Amino acid sequence: MSLTKQEALELFRSDDLIGVGMAADQVRRQKHPENVVTYQIDRNINYTNFCTEYCSFCAFYRPMGSPEGYVLDLDTIYQKIDETLALGGSGILMQGGLHGELKIDYYENLLRSIKQRYPKLHLHCFSAPEILNIAELSGLTIRDTFRRLMDAGLDSIPGAGAEILDDEVRRRISRLKCTAEEWVEVHRTAHALGMRTTATMMFGCGETIENRVNHLEVIRQIQADTGGFTAFIPWMYQRENTPLASQVKEEATAVDYLKTLAITRLYLDNIDNVQASWLTPGIKICQIALRFGANDVGSILIEENVVAAAGCHNHTNEAELRHIIHDAGFTPAQRDTLYRAYFLRYN
């Protein structure tokens, strides 16, 4: 039986962190009895930092016309991809701000140029707000935007832009960005076209536990209807250099992170993969999270600019990720973007 919303709220209020973690670990063992924990080698390429949305939790964006704004040229993107492939990477995650002038032809050329040069590279690109922005600027439907981007080489999309899928929160932290319903429409459309996506949640931005559970319910219902999510990735809001910081009285703690991740694993029982983060909570908490329901530690993140702009400067490498997985009692396996483990080394 799946958790009810009331049961999830009771778990959030519970002081029994270890009990919640053990229950989540049991679900993880049922879904992944092979005792393997996966990771990926990829790169987050932020092709532009121009953005028209002005989200209060973001320190990365620059308004249109800012002298600090940029749009990466193809040669720079190719160089970043070459560096990724040299480290054994199999794909790139490409995201940017919501540029006020770039239309569908720009993105088609970008994707097509990369695919022609790197035909086997998996392109995991463009958040739901970016897809909506491209569609609006180009006078296209969401479905037609996806069809054209897929024809140009788009393989899957990330779950970014979700933050908290409760408009009570969104109106406070990202009032110009898409609504929860619009985010849902983008991912449902992608799934209907046969494209896999991930889902995320940014918590610790002043939301209530009711807001968090509402978010999880939205994700669980989409997955029940479409089966299109490959993974769920919860992460903590980083406050440094962001306008929202003055409004959020308490930061999310390591205990809050572990409990939230464990409840995520219990509530989203129809999603196979739950990813632990090292970027925001740190590498040791990431390792502990492997006993709180997580079966993946994400990517080595050769490059990360958005969270770094908000004061998070954690780094890792493949050797360290394999080490924490092994020391937690699991077999590490490199995977691709669609969570297919394809490279096992038993050491």
Image: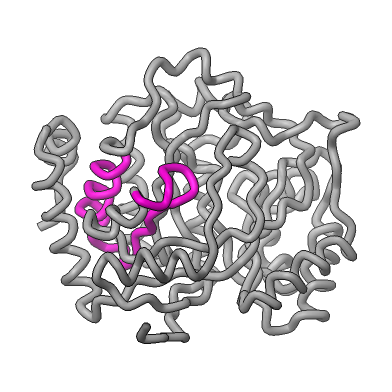
Q: Position of residue 292 (x, y in %)?
A: 23, 54
Q: Position of residue 57 (x, y in %)?
A: 56, 28
Q: Is residue 199 left or right of residue 68?
A: left
The image quadrant that residue 207 belongs to is: top left
Q: Is residue 28 left or right of residue 74?
A: left
The residue at the point 31 percent across, 53 percent down is 220
Q: Is residue 283 magenta?
A: yes
In this view of the protein, can residue 125 be seen by the observer? no
Taking 302 as reference, is 244 above or below it? above
Taking 169 as reference, is 215 above or below it? below
Which colour style is shown?
Answer: one colour
Q: Is residue 158 left or right of residue 272?
A: right
Depth order, front residue of 192/125: 125
Depth order, front residue of 299/56: 299
The image quadrant that residue 347 belongs to is: bottom left
In this view of the protein, can residue 256 be seen by the observer? yes
Q: Is residue 186 magenta?
A: no
The image quadrant that residue 121 belongs to is: bottom right
| Magenta extent | 257-284
The residue at the point 76 percent across, 77 percent down is 115
Q: Position of residue 73 (x, y in %)?
A: 89, 57
The residue at the point 41 percent across, 61 percent down is 297
Q: Is residue 287 left or right of residue 152?
A: left
Q: Quadrant of the N terminus?
A: bottom left
Depth order, front residue of 13/106: 13
Q: Position of residue 132 (x, y in %)?
A: 65, 46
The residue at the point 72 percent across, 51 percent down is 46
